[in-house]
Image: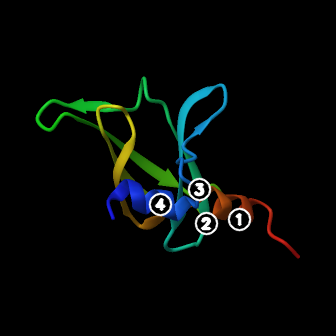
Amino acid sequence: MGIVGWLKNLFGSSELPTRQAGDKGIYLYVRLDRSGEVVRLRIDPGQDLNFDEDNGEYTCVKGIIGPKSYRQAEATFHFNSGRMLTTAEVKGGTLATPQEWEAYQHPSG
């Protein structure tokens, strides 16, 4: 299974929930290793993506700081020429789902 298939499976949908209606931003979610905090990231395709002419893809590097714990991580996201996510490398965290972010924002009980 390729990265797109894996991401579709991770997000539980045939369409990646990386965009919100009326907003051109790409939203991704990261769970920080040291605190367990889930952070939502917004990538602006017009400002944050850098084109790499050598391999014909876009990259974006994001420093991540948990707003509650101040724990840090760094992510490098790779996008194809259509600006769709192909791979992600996260140091100090892992990719999370929108559902995990919602659950973290609104814990039950």
Q: Earlier along the polypeptide chain: callout 3 or callout 4?
A: 3
Coordinates of residue 50 in the picture (x, y in percent): 29, 31
Amino acid type for the residue under numbered disc 3? Val
User: Label 4: which residue?
Assistant: 72
Q: How is the image coloured?
A: rainbow
Vertical placement of residue 41 versus 39, above or below = above
Q: Are marks 3 and 1 in contact (CB under 8 Å)?
A: no
Q: Find numbered disc 1 in the image and state the secondary structure of the residue it sits on.
A: helix
Label 1 and label 4: CA atoms lie apart by 17 Å
Q: Nearer the viewer, mark 3 or mark 4?
A: 3
Label 1: how many residues lie within 10 Å, few (<14), some (14-19) or many (20+)? some
Residue 68 as seen in the image, left or right of residue 86: right
Label 4: how many residues lie within 10 Å, few (<14), some (14-19) or many (20+)? some
Q: Earlier along the polypeptide chain: callout 4 or callout 2?
A: 2
Q: Are marks 3 and 4 in contact (CB under 8 Å)?
A: no
User: Label 1: which residue?
Assistant: 104
Residue visible at 45% across and 58% down in the picture: 7
Nearer to us in this view, 2 or 57: 2
Q: Are marks 2 and 1 in contact (CB under 8 Å)?
A: yes
Q: Are marks 1 and 4 in contact (CB under 8 Å)?
A: no
Label 2: how many residues lie within 10 Å, few (<14), some (14-19) or many (20+)? many
Amino acid type for the residue under numbered disc 4? Gln
Nearer to us in this view, 51 or 63: 51
